[in-house]
Amino acid sequence: MKPGDVVDDFELQDETGAVRSLSGLLADGPLVLFFYPVASSGGCTQEACHFRDLAAEFAAVGASPVGISGDDVSAQRRFASAHTLGYPLLSDPGHVVAKKFDAFRRWLPGGLHTRRRTFVIGTDRRVIAEFSSETKFDQHADEALTALRAHRAA
């Protein structure tokens, strides 16, 4: 997926077990879909908490974050609860959605198949921006906000 591409609708369970669709998540405004390798790891916790800490800024541009990893629903529930994230975490245990977004690695020690990638998606399901960095955990949220502000101003 790259800017301008249209994202196919999908459905996954969130941390509560509820089924969420991309189209349903986009009903309230643009979405920042961020893929992360594993719930509760150090870097993923830092990234997820930074998205949480910028909640007011995302709300100000009418957007919301949604995290996604290969972790099961119970791991996502523990992660969301432990850090009071306040936004959905989607469970993609078969990496079906990650593969569609080129956020999947075939093999890596420890089973860390999900690549750290972030996509800003407009209400028309078009990708507005994409970011990829495995080690700059705060950068994804910051860049997503910049892209959303520029998109809104255009």
Image (spheres, rainbow, N blue to C red):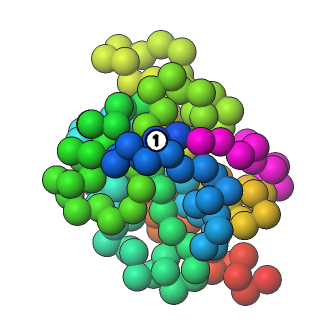
Q: Is any part of residue 27 visible from this angle?
A: yes
Q: Where is residue 35 in the image (x, y as percent from the top left)?
A: 49, 43
Q: With 122 as the anchor, is 140 left or right in this view?
A: left
Quadrant of the rendering where the N terminus is positioned = top right
Q: Is residue 113 magenta?
A: no
For disc 1, the marked residue is 13
Q: Is any part of residue 68 visible from this angle?
A: no
Instruction: Choose top left, top right, bottom left or bottom right for residue 53.
Output: bottom left
Quadrant of the rendering where the C terminus is positioned = bottom right
Count the marks: 1
The relative height of residue 136 versus residue 72 in the rendered view (above or below) is: below
Residue at (59% x, 27% y) in the render = 96
The relative height of residue 141 versus residue 67 in the rendered view (above or below) is: below
Pick whichever, 84 or 119, lies toward us. 84
Residue at (72% x, 67% y) in the render = 123
The relative height of residue 22 versus residue 150 in the rendered view (above or below) is: above
Magenta stretch secondary structure, dominant: loop
- The magenta-colored residue range is 1-11
Element type where label 1 sits in the image: strand
Q: With 20 as the anchor, is 18 left or right in this view?
A: left
Q: Position of residue 112 (x, y in %)?
A: 39, 24
Residue at (31% x, 17% y) in the render = 110
**Mark 1 Cα-neighbour bin, 10 Å: few <14, some 14–19, many ≥20:** some
Say what amino acid the circle numbered 1 marks.
Gln
Pick whichever, 18 or 100, lies toward us. 18
Q: Position of residue 18 (x, y in %)?
A: 43, 48
Q: With 32 as the anchor, is 102 left or right in this view?
A: right
Q: Is residue 10 magenta?
A: yes
Residue farthest toward the left in the current orientation of the protein: 82
